Amino acid sequence: MWNFRLKKVSFMLLLIFTLFFSTVGSADAYTNGRKPNTKNVEVQVQAYNTQWVQAYTNWDSNHKYRNIYSRSGAPNIMTAEYDSSRPGTFGRIIYNNGHSTYSTPFYTYINSYRSDVRNSANVRRSVASHEIGHVFGLADLRGSVSSIMNGDRNRERLTYPTTLDINRVNIIR
Ligand SMILES: [Zn+2]
């Protein structure tokens, strides 16, 4: 009888701990598990130049361990694509490698199919900043959190990485 109660209590404790730590774990899962494979990330901007450059310049000045800048012939492409097959998508990044932990080389585009993208420099800047967040290892977020990675953010108003985003990429390094 005592033994049975002990087992029951142990099981309940195990359950509580498991739930607690799995909750903490998911709240901390802000990385996509990738990083650039070099300290310097060299990019080629091919369309929407102004917003891509503003976005990467902002990241560059806030990242403590990485540099990101333009170089002709660089392997990482930033551009625009008229992607009518993804009408709900503002932007997209494709990792051109067979590696699960590298973000480079990459190809990323802002979706010019969307009228809000075509009509607003702020929206384009917000999307560019978001995609570069993926380059530095940040994952997509949802909800009310103040982050450039938040898919529910107001793209007219939140156009650059927040303190939270900067702190996080500097932890990922
Ligand atoms: Zn994303």
Image: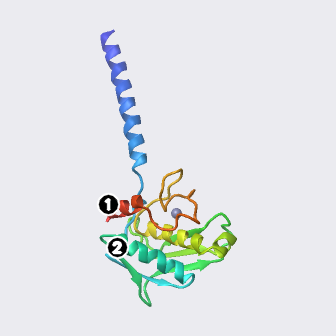
Q: Residues within 10 Å of mark 1 (few under 14, many from 20)?
A: few
Q: Give the CA distance from mark 1 to mark 2.
A: 16 Å
Residue at the image point whose x is 57% and y is 81% from the top: 48
Nearer to us in this view, 64 or 131:
64
Give the SS element for disc 1.
Answer: helix
Q: Is residue 84 visible?
A: no
Dot 2 corresponds to which residue? 37
Q: Residue furthest bottom?
A: 72
Q: Position of residue 55 (x, y in %)?
A: 47, 74
Q: Position of residue 16 (x, y in %)?
A: 38, 30
Figure colour scheme: rainbow
**51 w.r.t. 100: above or below:** below
> Is the CB–ligand 1 distance for label 1 below 8 Å?
no
Dot 1 corresponds to which residue? 171
Kind of residue indicated by mark 1? Ile
Q: Position of residue 127 (x, y in %)?
A: 55, 69
**133 w.r.t. 53: above or below:** above
Are circles 1 and 2 on residues that touch, CB within 8 Å? no
Q: Position of residue 147 (x, y in %)?
A: 47, 59
Kind of residue indicated by mark 2? Asn
